[in-house]
Image: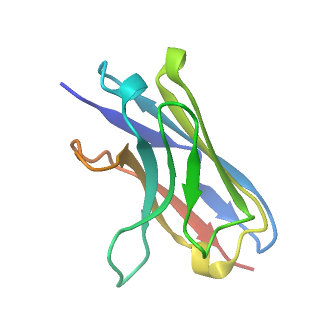
Amino acid sequence: QVQLVESGGGLVQPGESLRLSCAASGSFFSISTMGWYRRAPGKQRELVASITSGGSTNYADSVKGRFTISRVNGKRTLYLQMNSLKSEDTAVYYCNSVGLLRSWGQGTQVTVSS
């Protein structure tokens, strides 16, 4: 059974940083394009960053230059380094594959507030 477990969220002030982690079970991880998604209050879930199995990355315009996605296939772990956080980054963050979605994890809450 595929399981995705996100961690690393918290309450930070604008301009600060956080690093999110996602631990995945299942052999799909190393061959899949993986992504970080977020759902802000009252909004639909959106894909903010993705990374292919080979390490090519793509970012939503809203986070480009501030967020960095990375992965360690041997550890089945996905990361999201978030710098220069803004209040509009406040959301629950999830990881999942891109395209063929797996079961969603519980997500990790990121709150950016002064």
Residue 111: x, y in percent? 59, 69
**Where 30 falls versus 13 (above or below)?**
above
Please report the residue visible at 40 percent of the width from the left and 80 percent of the height from the top: 41
Picture quadrant where residue 33 is located: top left
- Judging from the image, the colouring scheme is rainbow
Please report the residue visible at 24 percent of the width from the left and 29 percent of the height from the top: 2
Between 89 and 56, the one lying in front of the other is: 56
Residue 77: x, y in percent? 51, 29
- Residue reaching furthest to the left: 1
The quarter of the image holding the N terminus is top left
Left or right: 40, with 111 as reference point? left
Picture quadrant where residue 26 is located: top left
- Residue reaching furthest to the bottom: 42
**Where 74 falls versus 23 (above or below)?**
above
The quarter of the image holding the C terminus is bottom right
Please report the residue visible at 35 percent of the width from the left and 85 percent of the height from the top: 42
Q: How many marks?
A: 0
Between 54 and 74, the one lying in front of the other is: 54
Please report the residue visible at 27 percent of the width from the left and 50 percent of the height from the top: 99
Left or right: 108, with 18 as reference point? left
Residue 35: x, y in percent? 44, 49
Residue 110: x, y in percent? 56, 62
Between 22 and 46, the one lying in front of the other is: 46
